[in-house]
Amino acid sequence: MGSKSLNRRELLKNSAALAGGLTLGAAAPAIGAQQSAESHHAPPSSPMIKGDKDGMIAYGERSNYVKSVRIPHGGRPSPDTFGLTFHVATPLQDSVGVITPSSLHYFATTRGSFLPDIDPSKHTFMIHGLVDRPLTFTMDDLKRFPSVTRLHFIECAGNRSSPRAKTVQESHGMTSCAEWTGVLLSTLLKEAGLKGSAKWFVAEGGEEVKGASSMPIAKAMDDCLLAYGMNGEPVRPQNGFPLRLMVPGFEGIFHTKWLQRIKVVDRYYMNYNDFGHLDDEPKTAALGYQIGPKSVITYPSGAQQLPGKGFYEISGLAWSGGGAIKLVEVSTDGGKKWNKAEFKGTPQRMAFTRFGYQWNWDGSETEILSRCTDELGQAQPTRAQLAKYWNKSYDQTFSVPGLDNSVQPWHIASDGRVTNGFA
Amino acid sequence: MGSHRTLPLAFAFVLPVLLISGASALAQGPSFGIGRTPSPEEIKARDISIGPTGEELPPGKGTAKEGAQLYRSKGCAACHGATGLEGTAPNLKSKDPKNPDVWARGRILPLRAPFATIVWDYINRGMPLNREGTLTADEVYSLTAFLLFINDVIPEEQALDQQSLPKVKMPIGDNYASLPDWKPRTKRLQGYPF
C-alpha cells in the first residue's frame, strides 16, 4: 500500500513536469537542454523505451518489468537424464482473465526439447480408414471450410498438487486456456463419409515419435476441432503448429499436436500413447479420459505475501471436462463455511472461468479454498471426500485416481505469508 | 447441408440426435468438394498404425537372436540396459517375472501389452531415440521377437512375421479394463459424484 501512494505522488509530479514541458515546448529548443539546465521541474522518474526499438514495432514485446515465465514441471526431472525438457508449466499465479498468452501456454511432449519445424505450405492432413472417401487436405484447403472459434482449456494428466509444490504454478501449472480457431472434425468426417463400422479413430502427430492416441468416434462427431489458430494467430510450434487436434475436456495428451493423420477404425487401437492409459481397474481407466470439475485460487496463492489485513479480491480459475462451470464456492475459514463466488464473464463449455470473491481479511491465520460444480452436476471433491469414496485412509500416501481434481487449500499465516495447505 | 424438409411428428423424438450428427449427415455425398483423394499406395505409405489384428503389418521377419544383436548395435542397450534392466530409459524386462499377478510384474511394454502388435508399432514409431523411423521392417520384427523372448512370451527360435506376430498370446490375456462407451454430455464415470 505504501509503495502505491508513493507511485501516485510521483505520477502527480511527472504529470506536472509533462504539463510544464508542453507549455515550455515552443520556447525550449530541446528536451535535453531543459534537463541539463537548472530546473524546478522534476526529471522523468523512469527511462523511456525507444518506440522504434527492435521488438516493439514488428512483433510487440511486453514490458521489461513483467517477468512472468514458464518453468519446467516438477513432477519429472527436467532436463532429464537425456538432457531433454519434457513438461513446462504456466505461471497461473500471474494470470488475469481466462486466456493464457500463447508464449506462456503450458506444454508437455514426449521428448520436448525438439519440435518439428513444419513448413505449413508442405503440411498435409489425411483422413482414411473406415470412410467412403479417404481425403488429403493442405492447410489452405482446411482454411476454406466453415470455421469455429472457441475457448478451451487443455490440462495434462500429470497436473497433480503435492506437498512439495510451493506455488500454484508448481501445483496446477500444467493447464492453460486459449482461444482456438479451426474446422470441426465432424465437418471433415462427414465430407469423407463415415462407414457404419466406424467406432474409434486414431490421431497421429508429425513429431519424431509420431505420437498416436485412440479416441471414440462419438467424441469426433461431437466437438473435436482441428485448430490452426490460437489466440488470434497461428498455433505456436510448442502447441502443434501448423495444426493440432482439440479434444475439449479430454486429458491433454489426446490433443494431438502437429496433426498429420486420422485413421477411422472399428476398435480401440492401443497405439503409442494408449499404452499409458492401460489399466486393470475399469473405474480408474474411465477416469483417465474426460477431466472432472476443478478449480484453484490463483490469488492469494502459494509463496505470495499479503501486505496486511484488509480488503482482498480472492481470484481463481475453474474448469471442467464435463461442460460449463455452474457454481464456484470459496471458503476463507478452512472449509467450514462456503460462499458463492462471482463469475467474471459467462462460463464457456470446457474453458476456464475466472471467479472472484470479496474478502476482508482480519489478519488471523486461516486457510482459503475453492470448489466448483459443472453443468452435469459433477462436484469438485476434497481429498478427504475422495479417500472416503474410494475406501482408502486419507494420509500422505493417498493418490487421487485419474486426473487429480481435488480442492487446493492455501494456508495464510498471521504475517500474511501464503503456503501450500498440503505441505 | 441445407436439407430443410418438414419433419414428420414422429421424428421429433430423434431430433436431438440429428442435431448432434448435423444436417449434412443426411446428404449423400461431399458437401464442400474440398480436398484430394489419396491413392491406395499413398495411404499405405503413410499408415503406420498397427491395430490388434496386425492387418497393416508390412512384409518382413525376424528372430530373437537377430534382435539381440540389433539391441546392442542400434544403441538400445545404452539407454535400456544390457539386459533390459537398470537403464536410464524404461525397463524392458520385469524385475519380478514369476509373480502370478501380471499387473504386479511392472509396467513393461513387451510384457503388459495386450497385443504383440503394440510392441511392433511402438518400436517402429518411436525408436531408437533421435533416429526414429530408421529401422527396417525386418529389424522391428527382430527387436520385437527379442523383447518378447526375454520376457518369456515366445521361445527364442520363434520367427515373427505378418502372420505370426498378431497370433502371439500375451500373458495379460483380457485381464485389463475396457473403456466406457463415451457419449456427449455424460459424466466421466456413471455413479461417480466428482
Image (spheres, coloured by chain):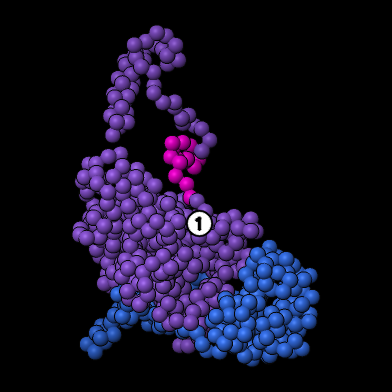
Chain colours: A purple, B blue
Residue under the point 57% across and 69% down = A211
Q: Secondary structure at mark 1?
A: loop
Tell me, yes or no, if residue A232 can be seen here.
no
Screen quadrant of the N terminus of chain B? bottom left
Q: Could you say which is closer to the camera, residue B70 or residue A81? A: A81
Numbered range of the magenta stretch:
A56-70
Q: Which residue is mark 1?
A: A74
Q: Is residue A230 above or below residue A349?
A: above
Residue A220 position within the rendered picture, expressed as x and y whole percent measured from the top left: 43, 75
Instruction: State left or right for residue A161 relative to residue A5.
Output: right
Q: Main secondary structure of the magenta part?
A: loop
Residue under the point 44% across and 55% down = A165
Q: Could you say which is closer to the camera, residue A282 or residue A17? A: A282
Q: Is residue A276 above or below residue A414?
A: below
Residue under the point 32% across and 68% down = A384
Instruction: State left or right for residue A102 relative to residue B150.
Output: left
Residue under the point 41% across and 75% down = A287
Q: Is residue A29 above or below residue B23?
A: above
